[in-house]
Amino acid sequence: MPSRDGLLVVISGPAGSGKSTLVEHLIEKIPGNSRRAVTATTRSPRPGEKDGIDYFFLTRDEFRRMIDDGELLEYTEFNGNFYGVPRHSLERELAKGGVVLLVIEVDGAESVKFFFPNAIFIFIIPPTPKELRRRLESRGTESQKDIEKRLAIARREMERIGEYDYLIINDDIETATQDLAAVIRAVDRTLILGDEMENWDLGLFANWNTRQIL
């Protein structure tokens, strides 16, 4: 079947929504050609993290050079560290086909949409504010003041759900994973519609029922 560029799926949600865990679970549990886009940061690697797999770990000088050279689709500074999306790395991943999952904050997603308007944008939230607070507190890594700050940020982020194509409630990880997979499959099939006769001639409907992007 003729190939085409990969499908970019942008995942956002407040801290504690479980968006990163959900993406990792999707890649692990559902076989297919899906992978997470690697972003860049100036923070130090945490135990078990590997350069080029979890993040591109850069010095502040290296990161600033990428900013100056226009190599980042977007970037932000949080808690004293820079985070950003390298343009060429993302483009290379998309050229391989399949599904490229980009976990990014709301402001960053807005910038990515400018460059990739055909990407699919999905917002992840826990079922209730109470559950979000519980998740943040259960981490045991932040002060109560920092938790309150994150909850305030979460409310501001929630106001922008309307900018996204889909909303997934991450109450149960298995159910949320299936919901995410269902959205991606549906979008993938929709993308080859439009000029049905031409696509049929190209063979894009071959093995329609057995073809899996995930």
Image (spheres, helix red, strand yellow):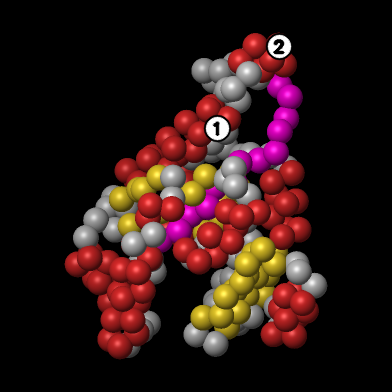
* Pointer 1 or 2: first along the chain: 1
**Is 206 left or right of 179, judged from the image as shown?**
right
Q: Is residue 139 visible?
A: no
Q: Which mark is residue 99?
A: none
Q: Which residues are magenta?
A: 1-13
Q: Position of residue 183 (x, y in %)?
A: 44, 37
How many labels, in total?
2
Q: Quadrant of the C terminus?
A: top right
Residue topped by disc 2? 201
Residue drawn at point x = 48 percent, y = 54 percent: 11
Q: Determine which quarter of the picture holds residue 128.
A: bottom left
Q: Position of residue 1 (x, y in %)?
A: 71, 21
Question: Quick one: label 2, few (<14), some, or many (20+) residues within 10 Å?
Answer: few
Q: Is residue 5 magenta?
A: yes
Residue drawn at point x = 39 percent, y = 59 percent: 160
Between residue 67 and residue 9, name the one nearer to us: 67
Residue 135, relative to residue 43: is it above or below? above
Residue topped by disc 1? 188
Question: Quick one: label 1, few (<14), some, or many (20+) residues within 10 Å?
Answer: some
Residue 12, relative to residue 47: is it above or below? above
**Is 107 left or right of 82, judged from the image as shown?**
left
Please tell me whether mark 1 sits on a helix, a strand or a loop.
helix
Residue drawn at point x = 51 percent, y = 81 percent: 78
Between residue 90 and residue 140, name the one nearer to us: 90
Residue 186, relative to residue 49: is it above or below? above
- Real-space CA distance between mark 1 and mark 2, rounded to the nearest whole angstrom: 18 Å
- Indicate the amino acid at tag 1: Asp
Q: Determine which quarter of the picture holds residue 207.
A: top right
Q: Position of residue 70 (x, y in %)?
A: 76, 69
